[in-house]
Image: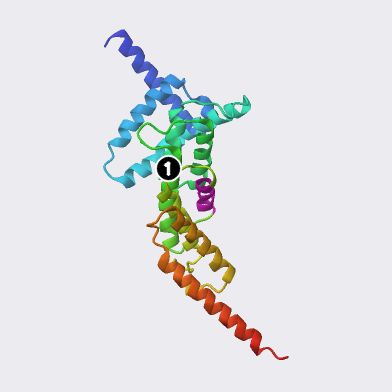
Amino acid sequence: MGGAKILAFKESRRAQKELEKVRQTGNGKYAPSLHLQLIELETDLTRLKAFARRSDKIAHKRDVLLPKWLPITNDYLAKLDANNQKDKVDDHPIFAYCIVWLFDVSELGRAIELAFRAIELGQPMAGSIRRQWAGFISDTVFDWAQVQAENGHSIEPYFSMVFKRVVNDWKLPEPVTAKFYKFAGLALLRTTNGDIAPTQVGDIERLQQADALLEKAASLHKHAQVKTVRNKIEMRIRALETYGSQEVGQKPA
């Protein structure tokens, strides 16, 4: 083995020991130089690709990669804040991969927080993903919210956090923005078990709010497919108004 290879081997071994200390302590201050970090990151990405099952990849990200690399990301962001570099444009691949892994292991709160920060800092997307942050975040959270809603589980606060960005900040394709409006409208019509049932909603204001969201979806994308549910909302509102009128008419003078 030549001198250069021996040196590289020793550096790699030292970096691995230091990163193991990071994993054990949760403190990024024990990390090796950025140069050695990036070499070890590439090694970890290669190992990750070797897993055939998605469940095994997720477990490896949760149990090995995030404990190893997230403290370094936290330390990096803390130093930016301490040096008043909150809008620094930089490329820190470890930061980017940690965000993607957090989404993969369903740590949505921290994932969204760091993803928004990545956009603010101009952090490029992780190299293995050919997407921009806004599209990646919106699709990932939307898919998660669909599963949650269909099973009668809460989609908050994560859906609203991203919906707000989709509506106000991100210039996504119209069909993508439309599906968010549609989903937000349908969410107001869901029962506790996840079914979409306008006839089960007794609040006219809630029905009108849902209809306004669905109308916006239709205005953004002609194939939003909201006509049928909007008709049901209209019929439900009429029924509630008629019932309300009857109630008033039956009150004693």
Q: Which residue is mark 1?
A: 135
**Coloring basis for residues:** rainbow
Assess disc 1: are there few (<14), some (14-19) or many (≥20) residues with their C-alpha within 10 Å of its C-alpha.
some
Magenta region includes residue 23? no
Q: Quarter-wise, where is residue 78 in the image?
A: top right
Whole-percent x, y for residue 81 in the image: 61, 29
Report if residue 128 is visible in the image. Answer: yes
Residue occupying the far bottom of the picture: 252
Q: Quadrant of the C terminus?
A: bottom right
Magenta region includes residue 163? yes
Q: Compared with residue 12, is residue 193 higher up or lower down, i.e. above or below?
A: below
Whole-percent x, y for residue 132 in the image: 42, 37
Residue drawn at x 55%, y 26% is 88
Residue drawn at x 49%, y 70% is 233
Residue drawn at x 45%, y 50% is 177
Q: What's the magenta bit mostly, secondary-structure-wise?
A: helix
Q: Compared with residue 8, is residue 249 higher up or lower down, i.e. above or below?
A: below
Q: Quarter-wise, where is residue 93 in the image?
A: top left
Q: Amino acid at mark 1?
A: Gly
Q: Secondary structure at mark 1?
A: helix
Q: Nearer the viewer, residue 210 or 149?
A: 210
Q: Compared with residue 230, is residue 98 higher up or lower down, i.e. above or below?
A: above
Q: Nearer the viewer, residue 54 or 9?
A: 54
Q: Compared with residue 194, is residue 117 higher up or lower down, i.e. above or below?
A: above
Residue drawn at x 35%, y 31% is 44
Q: Which residues are magenta?
A: 157-167
